[in-house]
Image (tube, rainbow, N blue to C red):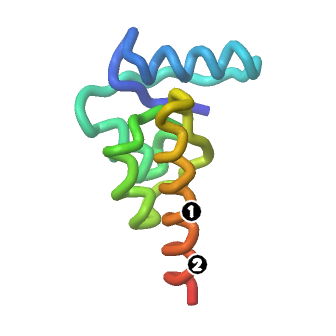
Amino acid sequence: MTYASAGIGSASHMAAERLRLAAGIDVQHIPFRGAEGMAEVMAGRIDFYFVPIAPAVPVIADGKVTSTSCTTRPKRLWTCRRFRKDWRSSASSRSR
């Protein structure tokens, strides 16, 4: 299993390392610069990527990737909940 990050020591790298240690999983870190990491996830060559919600919304809404979780400060949690609700309703309308 592989994960993308915005570079060594970046927030996305640290978030994935925290998950790796907490879950006790064996994953390989693949650092990227810019939007390359998301492109590799969309292509299916990378398994997961911790990415800020703003750049993730368009690719999730288009069905190019799937969001499995949303991490944020409690103050901003409503954004994730609202996004999930909106995304689920748009996904169910597209499948009809």
Q: Secondary structure at mark 1?
A: helix
Residue 80 at what x, y percent from top left?
51, 46
Q: The residue under label 1 is which amino acid type?
A: Lys
Q: Residue at x 23, y 32 (%)?
A: 34
Counting residues from the N terminus, which is met first, the one under dot 1 or under dot 2? 1
Residue 25 at what x, y percent from top left?
72, 22
Residue 52 at what x, y percent from top left?
39, 36
Left or right of 12, for residue 67: right
Residue 46 at what x, y percent from top left?
48, 39
Left or right of 83, for residue 27: right
Query: Looking at the figure, which quarter contains the N terminus?
Result: top right
Please give the residue where the numbered disc 1 appears in the rendered image. Answer: 85
Q: Residue at x 41, y 42 (%)?
A: 53
**Residue 37 sits in which quadrant?**
top left
Whole-Å distance between the Cαs marked 1 and 2?
11 Å
Q: The residue under label 2 is which amino acid type?
A: Ser
Depth check: give the residue in front, 39 or 10.
10
Q: Residue furthest bottom?
A: 96
**Residue 27 sits in which quadrant?**
top right
Q: Residue at x 42, y 35 (%)?
A: 51
